C-alpha cells in the first residue's frame, strides 16, 4: 500500500516537473520571438531606434533591475533546502512585494515614456518596447500573486515550481535590459 502511494506521488511529481519545463520553454520561446522582432526592427531602422532610446530612462530601469534581482534572491532563499517554514513564507512574501515594487516603478517609467510613442519615427520602437516590457510586466504581476498564494498554502513542490518560474522571469529581464536600454 505504501509503495503504491509512493509510486503515485513520484509519478505526480514527474508530471509537475514536465509541465513546469513545458511552461518555461514556452515562455522563453515567446520572449525570444519578441526580443528577436525588436532586434530585427532595430537593424532595419537603427537611427530611429537610437533616437527613440534617448527617451527611455536607463537609471530607472537599472534600479528596477536591482529590485527584481533582490526579489529573485528572496525566491532563492524560499527554495533553499533546510529552510524553516516561516523563513520560506517570509521570503516568498518579500519576493512578491519586490515584484510588485518592480511593477510600480515600471508603470511610473511608462508614464514618462508614453508621450513619445505617438511620434511617427518612434512608433515601431515604442510599439515593440511596450509589447515586450508589458508582456514581462504581466508575468511579474501574475507570478507575484502566485508567490503570495504559495506562501499562504506552502508545499515544497509549489515553492520549487513558482521560484523556478520567477528565476526565468528574472533571466528574461536580464536579457531585455541591455537590449532595450543600453545597446
Image: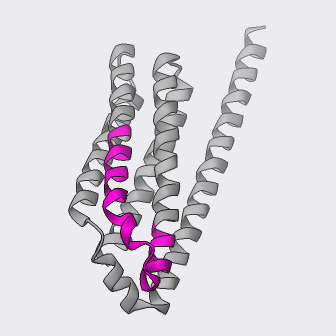
Q: Residue, x 40% and y 58% (percent of image)?
A: 173
Q: Quadrant of residue 19?
A: top right
Residue 174 falls left or right of residue 135: left
x, y percent for residue 85: 39, 15
Colour setting: one colour
Say if 131 sits above or below 142 in the image. Answer: below
Residue 120 falls left or right of residue 24: left
Q: Residue, x 34% and y 57% (percent of image)?
A: 111
Q: Could you say which is closer to the camera, residue 35 or residue 122? A: 122
- Number of marks: 0
Q: Could you say which is closer to the camera, residue 83 or residue 26? A: 26
Q: Residue, x 29% and y 54% (percent of image)?
A: 65
Say if 121 sits above or below 72 in the image. Answer: below
x, y percent for residue 179: 38, 73
Numbered range of the magenta stretch? 100-129
x, y percent for residue 17: 63, 39
16 inside magenta stretch: no
Q: Could you say which is closer to the camera, residue 43 or residue 48? A: 48
Quarter of the image where the N terminus is located: top right
Q: Residue, x 45% and y 74% (percent of image)?
A: 118
Quarter of the image where the C terminus is located: bottom left
Residue 99 falls left or right of residue 64: right
Q: Quadrant of residue 13?
A: top right
x, y percent for residue 140: 46, 45
Q: Residue most toward the top?
A: 1
Q: Is residue 116 visible?
A: yes
Q: Could you say which is closer to the camera, residue 19 or residue 64? A: 64
Q: What kind of secondary structure does the magenta stretch mostly adopt?
A: helix
Q: Is residue 82 visible?
A: no
Say if 105 sits above or below 42 in the image. Answer: above
Say if 126 sits above or below 76 in the image. Answer: below
Amino acid at each position: 500500500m505504501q509503495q503504491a502511494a509512493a509510486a503515485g506521488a513520484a509519478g505526480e511529481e514527474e508530471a509537475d516537473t514536465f509541465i513546469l519545463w513545458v511552461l518555461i520553454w514556452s515562455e522563453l520561446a515567446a520572449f525570444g520571438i519578441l526580443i528577436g522582432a525588436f532586434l530585427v526592427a532595430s537593424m532595419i531602422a537603427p537611427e530611429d531606434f537610437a533616437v527613440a532610446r534617448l527617451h527611455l530612462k536607463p537609471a530607472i530601469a537599472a534600479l528596477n533591475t536591482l529590485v527584481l534581482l533582490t526579489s529573485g534572491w528572496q525566491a532563492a532563499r524560499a527554495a533553499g533546502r533546510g529552510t524553516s517554514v516561516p523563513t520560506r513564507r517570509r521570503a516568498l512574501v518579500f519576493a512578491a512585494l519586490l515584484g510588485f515594487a518592480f511593477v510600480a516603478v515600471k508603470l511610473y517609467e511608462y508614464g514618462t515614456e508614453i508621450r513619445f510613442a505617438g511620434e511617427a519615427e518612434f512608433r515601431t520602437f515604442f510599439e515593440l518596447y511596450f509589447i515586450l516590457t508589458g508582456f514581462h510586466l504581466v508575468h511579474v504581476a501574475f507570478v507575484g500573486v502566485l508567490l503570495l498564494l504559495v506562501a499562504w498554502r506552502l508545499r515544497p513542490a509549489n515553492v520549487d515550481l513558482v521560484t523556478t518560474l520567477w528565476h526565468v522571469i528574472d533571466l528574461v529581464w536580464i536579457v531585455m535590459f541591455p537590449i532595450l536600454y543600453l545597446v
